[in-house]
Amino acid sequence: MKSANVDEFFRRLAAADPAPKTELNYLNAYTLLVAVVLSAQATDVGVNKATTALFKKVKTPQAMVMLGEEGLKSYVKTIGLFNAKAKNIVALSHILVEKFSGKVPSTREELQSLPGVGRKTANVVLNVVFGQPTLAVDTHVFRVANRTGLAQGKTPEQIEEKLLRVIPKKYMRHAHHWLILHGRYVCKARVPLCPECPVRDLCSYRSKTR
C-alpha cells in the first residue's frame, strides 16, 4: 500500500474512533497484565466474565500470591489453558513482589522476563498502561495487515516490523487498537463486511464481498 493510502487508511479509522480502548476490563496496570495473560487463545468476552469476580478480590500481585494457584483456578476455569495460565500468573506475581516492589515494569525486556508474558502481551501493557507506541500483533492485526496490503508477512514478528515502518508516527499510539477492532467487527475472518468498510477503496483484498 502506498504511503499516502496508509495515511488515509488510519485517518479514516481515527475519524470514526478517535480514542479506541482495549475491550479487556481492568482496574490498574497489574489487573491488565493478568487479563492479557488470560486472553491468550481466548476471547475478551470470556476473560471479562471470569475476571469480574476475580478483580473484586484481587487487585495486586500481593493479593494474587495470597490467593494462590488453586484459588485462582476456581475463578478462571472457564478460560482455555487455565491451568498453565494460573501457574504463570501466580509465578509472575511472586516475581513482581520480590523483584519489582509489586509494580508492573515499564520495559519490554522486564515484562518478557515474567512467566507467561510474550512480546504481544508486553506490547499491549506498554501501549495501554504506559502510552508507548507499540504494536501488538494478534490474529486480527495479522489478518487485516495481510488482507488489506498494509503489511504482508508470514509471522507476527514480520508484520509488526513492517507496520512499525509504514504507519505514520502520529497514528502509532492507537494503531494496534484500530486494527484489532477493525478486524474484530468489520474485516472479519470468514466473511469480511466489505460494504460497511470505511477503507474499502484503499484495500487490496481481491475477494471483496459486495
Image (cartoon, helix red, strand yellow):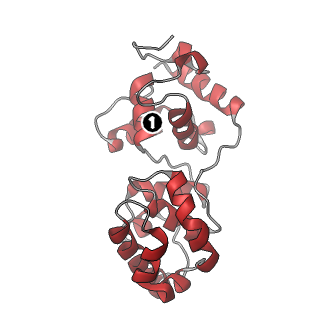
Q: Residue at x 60, y 61 (%)?
A: 129
Q: Position of residue 116 (x, y in %)?
A: 36, 67
Give 37 or 161, whichever is nearer the viewer: 37
Residue projecting furthest to the top: 210
Q: Position of residue 104 (x, y in %)?
A: 53, 72
Q: Mark 1: few, some, or many residues within 10 Å (few <14, many ≥20)?
A: many
Q: Of helix, strand and loop, which one carries label 1? A: helix
Residue 136 is at least partly visible in this image: yes
Q: Which residue is mark 1?
A: 163
Q: Is residue 193 above or below residue 144?
A: above
> Is the N terminus in the top left, top right, bottom left or bottom right quadrant?
top left
Q: Position of residue 188 (x, y in %)?
A: 47, 30
In the picture, measured across the screen, residue 112 lies left or right of residue 75, that is left
Q: Position of residue 110 (x, y in %)?
A: 43, 70
Q: Is residue 91 above or below residue 130?
A: below
Question: Mark 1 is on which residue type?
Answer: Leu
Give 106 or 186, whichever is nearer the viewer: 186
Q: Is residue 7 above or below residue 201?
A: below
